[in-house]
Structures are given as structure tokens and as C-alpha cells.
């Protein structure tokens, strides 16, 4: 035969069978998958509140919180599983989370709030 052959319109194309999934070096382990968690603080008279923690680079990249209609402030962040330390910055002053029961001493003589993310 010379030239190109005409495709057979009755021929069926069968996709290859699915390959078994394997974990590669680029696959995300459960520990590297970030989880979205929310923080809130009731401070109806505040003008500005930021969330600072080990997951934001502390004060250098603190996350602006948004005022809710009820006077609470809220921020949602993505963090890796594990224990994280954080505090709020309310109108320029460092403030603890009154709803947090666990704290860890910080190098400045105070304490950071902690939260475990699973």
C-alpha cells in the first residue's frame, strides 16, 4: 500500500486500563495538606484586629481580621496539621484569645495561645 490509509469508521478505540495509584515524591502526605481553620475575637469597640502566629510569620505578615455584624472579628487561614502558636493584635496591642485554654511561654515574657490542628 502506498499513501495514507483511510481510518476505519467502525474501529473502536479502547482506552488503556487504569494504572494503579502509587505515591511519588511529589505526592502530598497527609501531614503536608493544609487545613482551613477560623479564629474569632469579640471586640466591638476595636478599630483594627490582626491575627499573628507561627503560620503568618508573626507580626511581619499578620492577617487582617474582618469585623462581623455582631461585633466579633474573624479570620480564616490555611495551616498544616500540628500545634500552632498565635495571638491577636488589637489596635496595636498584643492580646490573648480568651477562648484558648492552652498556652505556651514566649521569649518576651508572655504567653502565646496554642491550637492543635489535626
Image (cartoon, rainbow, N blue to C red):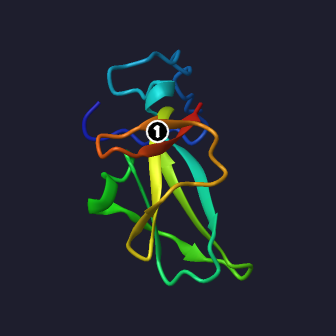
- Residue drawn at (30%, 51%) of the image: 57
For the point 60% across and 67% down, the residue is 74
Give the residue at x 57% y 42%. Answer: 9
Q: Residues within 10 Å of mark 1 (few under 14, many from 20)?
A: some
Vertical arrangement, residue 51 with respect to residue 70, above or below: above
Residue 111 screen position, x and y as percent: 44, 43
Q: Which quadrant does the N terminus fall into?
A: top left
Residue 80 visible, this orientation: no
Image quadrant in which the C terminus is located? top right
The reply, left or right, for residue 110 in relation to residue 57 is: right
Percent across and percent down for residue 47 are: 50, 84
Q: Which structural element holds mark 1?
A: strand
Q: Quadrant of residue 13?
A: top right
Instruction: Give the residue drawn at x 41%, y 68%.
Output: 93
> Taking the image as drawn, is residue 71 in sight?
yes
The residue that disc 1 covers is: 84
Amino acid at each position: 500500500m502506498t499513501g495514507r490509509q483511510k481510518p476505519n469508521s467502525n474501529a473502536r478505540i479502547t482506552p488503556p486500563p487504569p494504572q494503579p495509584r502509587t505515591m511519588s515524591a511529589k505526592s502530598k502526605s497527609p501531614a503536608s495538606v493544609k487545613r482551613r481553620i477560623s479564629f474569632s475575637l469579640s471586640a466591638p469597640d476595636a478599630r483594627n484586629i490582626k491575627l499573628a502566629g507561627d503560620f503568618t510569620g508573626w507580626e511581619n505578615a499578620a492577617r487582617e481580621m474582618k469585623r462581623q455584624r455582631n461585633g466579633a472579628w474573624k479570620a480564616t487561614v490555611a495551616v498544616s496539621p500540628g500545634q500552632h502558636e498565635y495571638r491577636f493584635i488589637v489596635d496595636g496591642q498584643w492580646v490573648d484569645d480568651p477562648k484558648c485554654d492552652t498556652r505556651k511561654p514566649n521569649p518576651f515574657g508572655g504567653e502565646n495561645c496554642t491550637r492543635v490542628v489535626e
